[in-house]
Amino acid sequence: MKNFCMGALALAGAVLAPWAQAADAGSGVLLYGVVDAGVAVTSTSGKGSRAGLLDGGLTDSLWGLMGAEELGGGWRSRFQLESGFDPSSGRRADGDGKLFDYAAWVGLASDDYGELRLGRQHPVGQLYGSALEIASWKEMGMGATFKASDNYQLDNMVNYLSPTWSGFQAGLGYSFDADGQDRFRTAANNRAVSAGLKYEQGPLLAVATWDQLRLADGPEAGGRPQAVQLGAAYDFEVLRLSVAWSRQRNGYAGLDGGGPDGLGPPAFARGGTVDAWLIGASVPAGPGTLLLQWSLAHPDWRWDDGARARNAQVATLGYTYGLSRRTTLYAFAGYASNYTLEEQFDPAHSHTIRCGAGISHRF
């Protein structure tokens, strides 16, 4: 093993040396971010209602640094550091205390060979699938039913994105330790695989993704959590239409579905399946844009008391108005059935209503 590692280092040095000698002095670092806050009223049957500030009603609040350096020969190094926060309190959005919870990666990119990224980042399935989202309203967007397109990141990840050929791009990623358990043996950690194919040409976008989670300590029954997503969006100029389908099995592959381990309801993690559908439309209306989105998630399992789990639905209607290139006003209303903001499937068959308005500023 020692000889193998030494040989690999020598080979890497030989390959990288010409790039280092040809490195250009030019480089750049960009500071960017979003501050988004609003006011909302949320009502859930059986629990009552709550009014107050809403963090990230249209998009998450975050700040980040992104940079690149030209290395010559069509190669460049790149990095991204990104952290989410809540404007209402100033606290980091990540409860685990990560400094850069949204992104922390470094990579090499080539016009001819694609890009390799190392570090904490979105998996390929999330990168491609989330591009189909029309309305990203807080906790009522595409990620409410399509968990593989939710805003989640994985630790210890290697992502490769191919060059674009005639509109096609492929991506493949692997996480050695998805949730930072940091156990010595690789197989003792939760690992993840993510792959996707994207076609984007003119007004058409089409994606296909596959994600799988390899649990170190999985449920007694069931298999590996996985998700397949298929979808397309087309810009007709008078409206942009988006449709998608997903099959999620044996729990949520992103560990982002609630429950004690992030896999979602235990009956789902023990061999259950969720089929989800989404349709959305973005329509220019007056000085702004009207956003409509509906999604449904169909479970096939029963709760512990024998009752069959019911479909969860989320429907939203919203409007955005750009005060400038960087500042947007928004208002929206959402309704969800058999769903709460904490649990995608609610055995008590609750319904949730949320109405909100706010301002989003990009810098």
Image (cartoon, grey):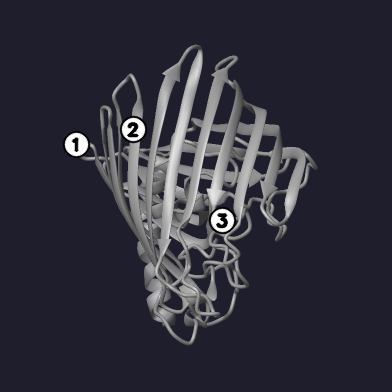
Q: Secondary structure at mark 2?
A: strand
Residue at screen point 55% across, 24% down:
320
Crowd around label 3: few <14 · some 14–19 · many ≥20 (10 Å): many
Crowd around label 2: few <14 · some 14–19 · many ≥20 (10 Å): many
Q: Nearer the viewer, residue 306 or 202?
A: 306
- Tell me the number on the disc at residue 339: 3
Q: Secondary structure at mark 1?
A: loop
Corner quadrant of residue 110: top left
Q: CA distance from mark 3 to mark 2?
A: 25 Å
Q: Earlier in the sequence, mark 3 or mark 1?
A: 1
| Residue where numbered disc 1 is placed | 166
Please indicate, yes or no, whether residue 51 appears anywhere in the rendered image: yes
Q: Nearer the viewer, residue 263 or 305?
A: 305
Is 61 left or right of 115, judged from the image as shown?
A: right
Q: Which quadrant holds the C terminus?
A: top right
- Tell me the number on the disc at residue 241: 2
**As drawn, 292 above or below 172:** above
| Residue 310 on image: x %, y % | 47, 63
In the rendered image, the residue lying farthest to the left is 166
